[in-house]
Amino acid sequence: MAGKYGETILGYTWSKHKNLDRSVVCNSCNKKFEVSPYRLKTAKFCSLKCRNKSYSEDKSYHRQHSDKTKKILSLMSRGSKNHNWCGGVSRDRHGGYLYIRWRIAVYKRDSYTCQDCGQLGGKLNADHIKPWSKFPSLRLVLSNGRTLCEDCHRKTDTYGFKARFYQLATNNI
């Protein structure tokens, strides 16, 4: 369909100027092919086959690092040099295999009963008597755990963010 500015094909208006050269030479097979005006500066290959052939032959495209370079790159991104470094803060979280085993052992020892109100079953939590964050060596010690229902667990001094302000009685003396 011819319009005021030229022929419209697939939503693009082609110029009527006869001097417009839309041909490009393929980098792989040296064949001339035509492209849309917006691809004149970026088109390099006439087909995917030519592009893939060219990239498979190009040794710099598939270059491998030497063992020495790999070692240097590895050392450059360790510890505090790594972009994910958080100042040495451990990312230990509840939910690992050993933690799950500890939690089940606490439930079994307490017969699935809340140690404060005596509720049997329901929504139970395995509570750390001494907080997880303050006592890493006691995290998986069975004697540092007790079974509590959710309501009783929320009332403890070590629940959630309250654990950050937890002080042992011996520290206050």
Image (spheres, helix red, strand yellow):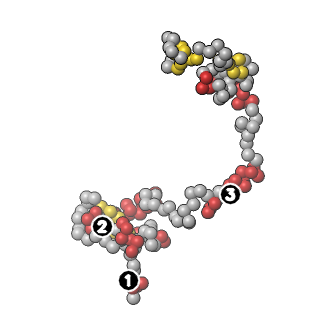
**Image point (38%, 71%), residue name:** 163
**Image point (65%, 57%), residue name:** 77
Which comes sooner in the sequence, label 2 or label 1? 2
Quarter of the rendering containing residue 109? bottom left
Q: Look at the image and tell me whether residue 74 can be seen.
A: yes
In-front residue for pair 118/53: 53
Which comes sooner in the sequence, label 1 or label 3? 3
Vertical relation: 141 (above or below) 60? below
Q: Look at label 3 and name its amino acid.
A: Met
Q: Look at the image and tell me whether residue 145 can be seen.
A: no
Contact between marks 1 and 3 (CB within 8 A): the answer is no
Which mark's residue is nearer the viewer, 2 or 3? 3
Marking on residue 153 = 2
**Image point (69%, 21%), residue name:** 24
How dense is the environment of label 2, judged by Cα within 10 Å: few (below 14), some, or many (20 and up)? many
Dot 3 corresponds to which residue? 76
**Image point (50%, 11%), residue name:** 1
Marking on residue 130 = none
Q: Look at label 2 and name its amino acid.
A: His
Which mark's residue is nearer the viewer, 1 or 3? 3
On the image, the x and y values in percent for residue 116 come to: 26, 71
